Image: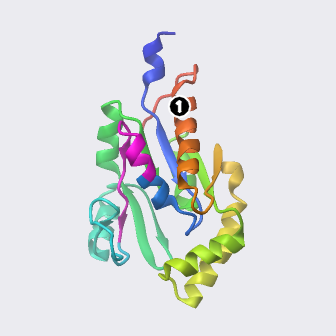
């Protein structure tokens, strides 16, 4: 096998319950993994303070999102807590076709969908140290009402049961984001060094 075979682009999927710190990990990765393509998720949820449209998310109207669904422009999509989330397909396909390793951030349902579409995708589950810690983080960010908080906590319990679908798990300890980022970097390095070549087709 030629060494070039091991340079086939890889698709990494970062997932886990709401509140585990996926956005913080992605921000950390952007500082150290400059060759990765970071797919930006489209969503209909309201833009939060400090978020940048096109960088953190692509904020679109419900009618625009439904148009994207109709035109099959999304790799996967889901309605999560009353808002649509989805991964635009075109730019991701272009990045992979250009040989760029890529990473997407989705919920656990979305990770399972992507694995069905792209069997060679590498799934990374991000977890909080405990459910109690996860609840504390959700309360601290003050973006959920009491009802939403309860729903997200219940969902976290269910999503933890999906671990068998994933290839790796990273625990994101509070105030130790750099450590979790280094673990994801190690996963990326290990997968890029695999002897068995894989190919990505979407």
Query: Please, which residue is most extreme toward the bottom here?
Result: 146
* Residue occupied by mark 1: 189
- Residues shaded magenta: 28-43
Total numbered badges shown on the rendered structure:
1
Give the SS element for disc 1: helix
Image coloring type: rainbow
Viewer-closest of 155 and 180: 180
Q: Within the image, what quadrant is residue 85 found in?
A: bottom left
Q: Within the image, what quadrant is residue 160 found in?
A: bottom right
Query: Please, which residue is most extreme toward the front here?
Result: 175
The percent coordinates of residue 142 (x first, y second) are 49, 83
Q: Is residue 110 visible?
A: yes
Q: Is residue 120 visible?
A: no
In this view, 142 is above or below 103: below
In this view, 76 is above or below 19: above
In this view, 136 is above or below 183: below
Q: Tell me, yes or no, whether the highlighted magenta stretch contains residue 186.
A: no
Judged left or right of residue 154, residue 100 is left
The percent coordinates of residue 115 (x first, y second) are 55, 46
Would you call the spot at circle 1 few (<14 residues within 10 Å), some (14-19), or many (20 or more)?
Answer: few
The percent coordinates of residue 15 (x first, y second) are 55, 56
User: For the C terminus, which image quadrant?
Assistant: top left
Q: Tell me, yes or no, whether the highlighted magenta stretch contains residue 33.
A: yes
The structure residue drawn at horizontal position 36% and vertical position 51%, both measured from the top left corner, is 39
The structure residue drawn at horizontal position 55% and vertical position 43%, both measured from the top left corner, is 182
The percent coordinates of residue 120 (x first, y second) are 54, 36
The structure residue drawn at horizontal position 58% and vertical position 64%, both measured from the top left corner, is 20
């Amino acid at each position: 096998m030629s060494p070039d075979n091991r340079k086939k682009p890889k698709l990494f999927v970062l997932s886990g319950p709401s509140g585990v710190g996926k956005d913080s990990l992605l921000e950390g990765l952007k500082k150290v993994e400059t060759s990765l393509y970071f797919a930006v998720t489209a969503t209909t949820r309201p833009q939060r303070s400090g978020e940048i449209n096109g960088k953190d998310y692509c904020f679109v109207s419900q009618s625009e999102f439904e148009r994207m669904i109709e035109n099959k422009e999304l790799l996967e999509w889901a309605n999560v807590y009353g808002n649509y989330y989805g991964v635009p397909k075109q730019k991701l396909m272009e990045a992979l076709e250009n040989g760029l390793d890529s990473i997407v951030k989705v919920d656990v349902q979305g990770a399972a969908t992507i694995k069905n579409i792209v069997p060679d995708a590498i799934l990374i589950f991000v977890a909080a140290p405990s459910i109690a810690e996860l609840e504390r983080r959700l309360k601290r960010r003050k973006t959920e009402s009491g009802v939403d908080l309860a729903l997200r906590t219940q969902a976290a319990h269910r999503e933890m049961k999906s671990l068998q679908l994933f290839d790796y798990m990273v625990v994101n300890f509070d105030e130790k984001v750099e450590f979790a980022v280094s673990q994801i970097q190690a996963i990326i390095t290990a997968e890029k060094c695999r002897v068995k070549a894989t190919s990505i087709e979407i």
